Amino acid sequence: MCMSEKKRGRTASVLHVVHQKKESKLRYEEANCHAKSGNLLKAVFAYTKALELNPVEKNALVARSKCYIMLGQPENALKDAETALGIDKKYLKAIYQKAEALYYMGDFEHSLMYFHRGLHVRPDHQNFKLGVEKAQKAIENALGIGTKKRSSRNSTPVSTNRSKSCSKLVEERSQKSACSKKIKKSSRLLRELAVDKDYLDNLLMHPDIRCKHKEDVEDPVVNHIREAVEYLNKRQEFWRQQLPPNFT
């Protein structure tokens, strides 16, 4: 008699879980309809109800994260993305949402890191490519690089601009060819971090940054870049020492 009661209890609990998952799916689909029609508040409410019934529904977490970004609430978007990554750390949609949330919070450096992480897994993913570009541009704008470029262009004649742009193009190409061997070697040692190191190295070589180095200006962004490059150099050297003597 006791065994039969236990079986009935287990069956009832299983049926309850199944019922909750079905209800959660219905709420999720309802929320998707609200989101498509632009009713973001109703969508958030429905996604929340779906998650109350099934807290590990990672698709609902990512979808609600998107709504929070469109509502101007990146902090809530970040929480949902991190919760989804806690359920599945390789979930690409959650990685993208975390990068987006960090970007809209103004944390461009960490946003760039997560965009790169997703791009490493899916090199053909257009959203990750665009994310890397906009995060890099935001960092440059924060340093005042983009503004100074535009102002200098406006103050010089067209012919001078053309000659400068041509010489700059030649210089950039020569720098790329000279650094290509170094990049190949570092990419073998640092793997996915080689792209970040290359970008940070180029950023430190920019005239605006070099000027701040010479003037000993205490800039937190410059300090972060310098610390990151030093860390990556140490890591690269460590892995180089682990290689066989005849490996080049």
Image (cartoon, grey):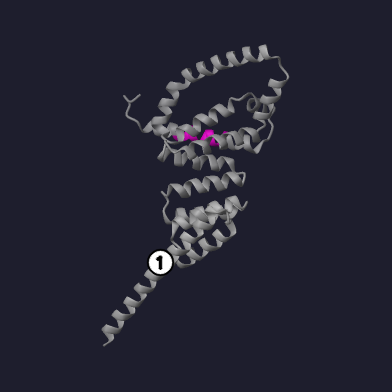
Residue 20 drawn above or below residue 166: below
Residue at position x 60%, y 45% from top?
104
Q: What percent of the width, then of the height, locates residue 78?
A: 55, 52
Residue 140 drawn above or below residue 175: below
Q: Main secondary structure of the magenta part?
A: helix
Q: Residue furthest bottom?
A: 1
Q: What percent of the width, then of the height, locates residue 12?
A: 35, 77
Within 10 Å of the Cα at label 1, are there few (<14), some (14-19), or many (20+) other Cα atoms? some
Q: What percent of the width, then of the height, locates residue 156?
A: 71, 16
Tell me, yes or no, if residue 5 can be seen here: yes
Residue at position x 42%, y 36% from top?
124
Residue in front for this viewpoint, 217 or 53: 53
Tell me, yes or no, if residue 54 can be seen here: no
Give the residue pinned by disc 1: 22
Residue in front for this viewpoint, 99 or 214: 99
Region rendered in magenta: 226-235
- Whether residue 158 sits left or right of residue 226 in the image: it is right
User: Is residue 233 in the magenta section?
Assistant: yes
Q: Residue furthest front?
A: 37
Q: What percent of the width, then of the height, locates residue 142?
A: 65, 36
Residue at position x 44%, y 56% from top?
58
User: Is residue 236 in the magenta section?
Assistant: no
Residue in front for this viewpoint, 57 or 118: 57
Quadrant of the drawing holding the N terminus = bottom left
